[in-house]
Amino acid sequence: MSLLRILKWTASVLLALVIAAFIFIALFGWNWLRAPLERQTLAQTGRVLLIQGDLTVHLGWPWPRLQARRVTFANPAWATQANMLKADEVALSIHLPQLLAQRLVVSDLHLVKPIVFLERHRDGRKTWLLDRNQQDDSARIDIDRLTLDQGVIGFEDVASQTSLHAELASLTKPADDTLTPGVSFSAKGKYNGLPLIAKGTGDSVLALRDDSTPYGLSLEATAGGTHVKAQGHITSLVKFSSIDMQLSLSGDNLNQLFTLTGIALPATRDYVAQGHLLRRGNTLRYEAFSGRVGTSDLAGWWQVETGGKRPLLTADLVSTRLTLDDLGPVIGARPGKLKAAVKAVAQTGEAGAVTPASKRVMPDLPFKFANWDSLDAEVKFSAKSIRQASYMPLEALSAQLRLKDSVLTLDPLRFGVAGGQLDAVITLDGRHNPIQAKAQVQLKRLALAKLLPADQKAKASVSQIGGHIKLAGSGNSVGTMLAHADGTVALLVSGGEISQMAMEKAGLHLWEIFRLTLTGDKQIKLRCAVANFDVKAGDMRANTLLLDTEVTTLLGSGHIDLAQEKLDLTLTQKTKNTSPLSLRSPIHISGNFAKPIIRVDQTRVAARALGALALGVINPLLALIPLVDAGPGQDSDCVQWLQGKK
């Protein structure tokens, strides 16, 4: 038989088979295919597929389309719901070459009144994976686009404490035909353990994997204490390959966003923000945003870049008017802690050997450093002005924060304070538990007058404070870090004037106090003041405490317990001029940080008074002897102190 005759015979047979197939389909339809499909699905997945309505196939290359009515597809036996899918109708276009290669790719899927339930087991099994063990990520249906008339979708993931129930419905097209048909949705449940409520609208076709068609979306959701409103477009709802949306955020605390985003942010007061959210490639950027944190305004931009060892957060943030108390949560300070401590001390008096938590003022909330390895960060922040706080006259703030490999560094951290400047470098090493902390602080040209109470500001006109603080310690809060700190603290005051009345009262010079009361207070020269402490295990031991004026020198000793927030200092006076009437006595500074207590040594005062009384019995003139402060104290060598040579 010639080759030509063989080819003609083969073509005739194939044509006959095709004609026979068309005749068969024309007479009996496609329903005969239901049983083979169900058997093949059961054999491949171990799960039951039921097609209880008509099955129709629309032939085409390479995308034949199947339509089936009254379809159910079972969940694995371990799932909490019997079926993964139940729908009145399923229509899908299949990529035939991929199917012949044993990979199911669907270009578009249309479901009518579906009930879909997806579940992830604690051990990682997923109901939407079609291998028998539901663990092979390649055994899934890739769907580019999805449309739903109306339906219900559920999702359960016990490991992440996520349980969602969403209802979807098609939006009807208005009579004027000005609105593109779409879908509305509402959802409720839990997301990562947080209660979730959401609603919104979207385009009619859900672009699940389509990287070329933006999907219009309007969303409003509340998860825990975080509220989100977004409107714009997302390209590919599975990969989020591109985002262009207007986004509003508000919430109780920025660190709650870690549960939603996996990005570690500092603790804050309540906040609101509005801005433009963009994603291009590996960069998610929130730009031109403005809002507030607490009562402080905040604006700028931030972005997160993925693709490295961990995400990198970069930001440039600006506040035109910062409220100092809004920084409290960032360093672990409880709102109103200082006022509460002062009130507690006033109600119950001084604390004993141990200062209870209710009477402490140092920040004690621990840093959530376990999350620091979730990202790296480089953040710039500046505050152009600061609302005045009664306890610290700050004027401006700038900082550069860097988080790398769980080590957080502020370098520099710069405050404008009392007309001068405070420069600090702070390092918190979160690779250790507890955190290893280091702080170096330089104080430059702080005006003493601006640090004094309002009624004292004019009494120390040009004095300036300088010095340094060098501390290293360990702890998971600022309070515990200071309680375990080692280092030095040195403060110097030079020049200016001080109230003579204040100094005479410090020496209990009764005659001078009486005279100044009649003539009025006056300013005297402040030669210098020095405070130098060694810090060991949270105990600040005074090496030098000195205040030298033209009439009196005060010398101090004692220590400050940072762990218990206790003060135990004693000041003694050396008068440079003879005072004819004085009850001079050491001055004791005790109490705690919430309420320091300053008092004279009552025993010494009583002894002088009794001595004067006893001598007065013998001779009234002798009564003056115990009350005379003969002086003369000597001027201190301030130059040596100020140069750090003593």
Image (cartoon, helix red, strand yellow):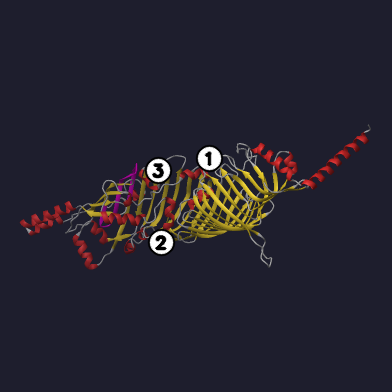
Image-based side of 91 in relation to 274, left or right: right
Q: Report which residue position mark 2 lands on.
A: 388
Which secondary structure, mark 1? loop
Residue 513 drawn in magenta:
no
User: Could you tell me the amino acid type at mark 2?
Assistant: Gln
Q: Report which residue position mark 3 lands on.
A: 475
Q: Nearer the viewer, residue 179 or 24?
A: 24
Which numbered disc, 1 or 3, marks the residue that appears first in the sequence? Answer: 1
Which secondary structure, mark 2? loop
Q: Position of residue 337 (x, y in %)?
A: 36, 54
Residue 547 drawn in magenta:
yes
Image-based side of 543 in relation to 125, left or right: left
User: Could you tell me the amino acid type at mark 3?
Assistant: Gly
Magenta stretch in the rendered image: 530-554
Main SS of the magenta part reads: strand
Q: Quadrant of the C terminus?
A: top left
| Mark sitting on residue 122 | 1
User: Could you tell me the amino acid type at mark 1?
Assistant: Arg
Q: Position of residue 600 (x, y in %)?
A: 21, 54
Q: Position of residue 494 (x, y in %)?
A: 35, 55
Within 10 Å of disc 3 (Cα), the crowding (few <14, some 14-19, many 20+) is many
Q: Nearer the viewer, residue 158 or 378?
A: 158
Task: Determine the residue positioned at 48% across, 46% down.
Answer: 409
